Image: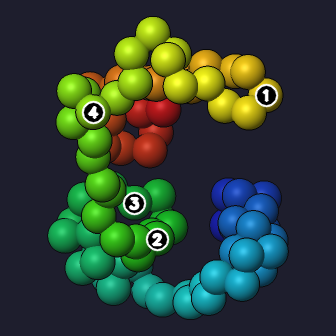
Amino acid sequence: DRKDKQALVKIQQLAEEISLKATFVDKGYLNSLCRNRPHQGFVLKARPLEFEEISSLERDGAQRKENGAAPLWLALDEVTDPQNM
């Protein structure tokens, strides 16, 4: 019985909601997918992040959304482990 069963159930529910295929594999395979980096028993295969140059971002909220709200930009440094969030 997993100590993180609630998290597993929630992840399964979220995956089903967006028709994301979930596959159960052994820890050794997860380790190989992560190149032996920490994974807490869950791995998501995804395409690499796409970054924007800071010079391409809007200045002073010049372009507001239809509802009048200015865009919010969040700059994070060295955030690669999801537990850092």
Characterize the local packing of mark 3: few (<14), some (14-19) or many (20 or more) Cα atoms within 10 angstroms: some
Across and down, in percent, residue 41 comes to 49, 66
What secondary structure is found at the residue carrying circle 1? Answer: loop
Mark seen at residue 39: 3
What secondary structure is found at the residue carrying circle 3? Answer: loop
> The residue under label 3 is which amino acid type?
His
Across and down, in percent, residue 27 comes to 40, 78
> The residue under label 1 is which amino acid type?
Asn
> Which of the 4 image quadrants contains residue 71?
top right
Mark seen at residue 44: 2
Across and down, in percent, residue 81 comes to 35, 44
| Residues at marks 1 and 2 touching, judged by CB atoms closer than 8 Å | no
Q: Nearer the viewer, residue 31 or 23?
A: 23
Residue position marked by numbered label 1 in the rendering: 67
> The residue under label 4 is which amino acid type?
Ser
Label 4 and label 3: CA atoms lie apart by: 33 Å
Query: Which mark is in front, 4 or 3?
Result: 4
In this figure, which colouring scheme has been used for the structure?
Answer: rainbow
> Which of the 4 image quadrants contains residue 29?
bottom left
- Asked if 43 appears above or below 77 in the picture, the reply is below
**Tag 2 or tag 1, which sits nearer the N-term?**
2
Across and down, in percent, residue 6 comes to 78, 59
Label 1 and label 2: CA atoms lie apart by: 34 Å
| Residues at marks 3 and 1 touching, judged by CB atoms closer than 8 Å | no
Q: Nearer the viewer, residue 2 or 51?
A: 51
**Tag 3 or tag 4, which sits nearer the N-term?**
3
The residue located at (49%, 17%) in the rendering is 62
Query: Which mark is in front, 3 or 2?
Result: 2
Mark seen at residue 56: 4
Query: Which mark is in front, 4 or 2?
Result: 4
The answer to whether 3 appears left or right of 50 in the picture is right
Instruction: Specify the farthest residue to the top.
Output: 60
